[in-house]
């Protein structure tokens, strides 16, 4: 059977499994690029013709382009998902990708905003109208909860409780994150502006709305954060994005003494090994300050 036809079948399976649009797009693009390479280099377009040497050649080709190990590994993960499905459906007897080792990745120091930048960013948007009030609430919610961009866009009114909110995370996994008194005050001001904004014009369940009363898109949130960072002169080497707000939240929580297990639950990580990456970005000076703060004898 042709690789492209099997991909269509697999993509439908991902949709039925309620995988995110981002995951589906990533799998589709990476598989199509591999198929194109296999056809151009080896004249292969069917699963029966394929073997692990063709995949190895593709990985070596990607390496020759100077791509980072993390990027190549993401390609390999998508291809492994595809071939796992083919094994499951008995189109092939084994997954070629499991015979190919992942690339060794360099330890990445996660960049985040510093305290001064965070302080300026949360004050950048004012409460003068709906859009500014919404943007202010977005920035503060990202910093104070560490939720993902897509998770913020998916929040609906009934998810909001008095001091916590329900977050719909990756893979349909739900979790509860706290609403601090600081964030609660900002949300109340935003909700007043939101009520005036929608009045009788819109019927909307989503907590954050576009100018047209529609569900907010991740692209809009990206722009809100980017404009904020630019407006307060964030350092040029720091990427102004919602994910950097998430990194900042994680590092600030660790510096304030939150244990890595609790942080992992707040972030919605599948396992603690993902959360541990944030520990690598904390400096020795921060560790010393934290150790004094949590000293057993100082807290007797």
Image (spheres, rainbow, N blue to C red):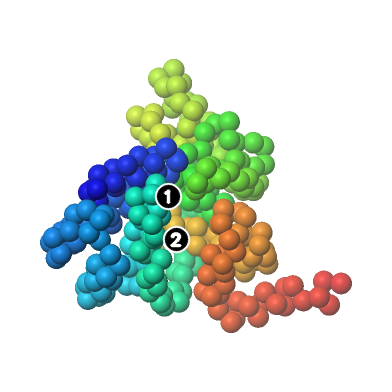
- Look at 40% across and 34% down and name the residue there: 215
Q: Nearer the viewer, residue 257 or 127?
A: 257
Instruction: Determine the residue located farthest toward the right in the rendered image.
Output: 300
- Look at 29% across and 46% down and name the residue there: 6
Q: Measured along the vertical axis of the image, is residue 271 above or below residue 164?
A: below
Q: Quadrant of residue 202?
A: top left
Cα–Cα span, label 1 and label 2: 37 Å
Residue 172, x across and y down, in percent: 52, 43
Q: Quadrant of residue 58?
A: bottom left
| Label 1 vs 2, first from the N-terminus | 1
Asked if labels 2 and 1 touch by Cβ distance under 8 angstroms, the answer is no
How many numbered circles does the render carry? 2
Q: Measured along the vertical axis of the image, is residue 105 above or below residue 226?
A: below
Q: Quadrant of residue 126?
A: top left
SS under mark 1? helix
Q: Measured along the vertical axis of the image, is residue 202 above or below residue 234?
A: above
Front disc: 1 or 2 = 1
Q: Measured along the vertical axis of the image, is residue 285 above or below residue 261?
A: below
Say few, some or many: other residues with alpha carbon within 10 Å of mark 1 (under 14 / 14 to 19 / 20 or more). few
Q: Is residue 24 left or right of residue 147?
A: left
Question: Can you identify the residue that label 1 sits on?
Answer: 88
Residue 85, x across and y down, in percent: 39, 50
Question: Can you identify the residue that label 2 sits on?
Answer: 244
Task: Determine which of the numbered discs, if any, sits on residue 113 in the image.
Answer: none
């Amino acid at each position: 059977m042709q690789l492209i036809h099997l991909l269509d079948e697999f993509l439908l399976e991902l949709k039925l499994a309620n995988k995110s649009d981002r995951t589906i797009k990533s799998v589709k693009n990476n598989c199509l690029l591999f198929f194109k390479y296999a056809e151009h280099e080896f004249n292969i377009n069917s699963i029966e013709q394929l073997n692990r040497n063709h995949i190895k050649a593709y990985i070596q080709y990607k390496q020759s382009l100077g791509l980072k190990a993390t990027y190549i590994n993401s390609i390999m993960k998508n291809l492994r998902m595809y071939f796992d499905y083919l094994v499951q459906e008995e189109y092939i007897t084994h997954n070629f990708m499991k015979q190919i080792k992942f690339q060794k990745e360099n330890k990445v120091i996660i960049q985040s905003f510093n305290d001064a930048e965070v302080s300026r960013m949360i004050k950048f948007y004012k409460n003068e109208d709906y859009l500014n009030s919404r943007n202010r609430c977005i920035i503060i919610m990202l910093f104070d909860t560490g939720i993902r961009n897509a998770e913020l866009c998916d929040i609906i009114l009934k998810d909001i409780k008095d001091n916590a909110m329900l977050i719909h995370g990756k893979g349909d996994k739900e979790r509860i994150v706290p609403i601090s008194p600081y964030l609660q005050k900002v949300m109340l001001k935003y909700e007043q502006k939101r009520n005036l904004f929608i009045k009788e014009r819109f019927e909307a369940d989503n907590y954050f709305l576009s100018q047209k009363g529609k569900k907010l898109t991740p692209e809009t949130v990206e722009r809100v954060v980017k404009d904020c960072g630019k407006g307060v002169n964030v350092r040029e080497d720091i990427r102004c994005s919602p994910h950097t707000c998430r990194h900042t939240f994680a590092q600030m929580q660790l510096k304030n003494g939150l244990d890595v297990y609790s942080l992992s639950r707040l972030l919605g990580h599948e396992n603690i090994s993902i959360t541990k990456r944030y520990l690598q970005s904390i400096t020795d000076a921060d560790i010393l300050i934290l150790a004094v703060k949590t000293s057993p004898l100082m807290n007797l």
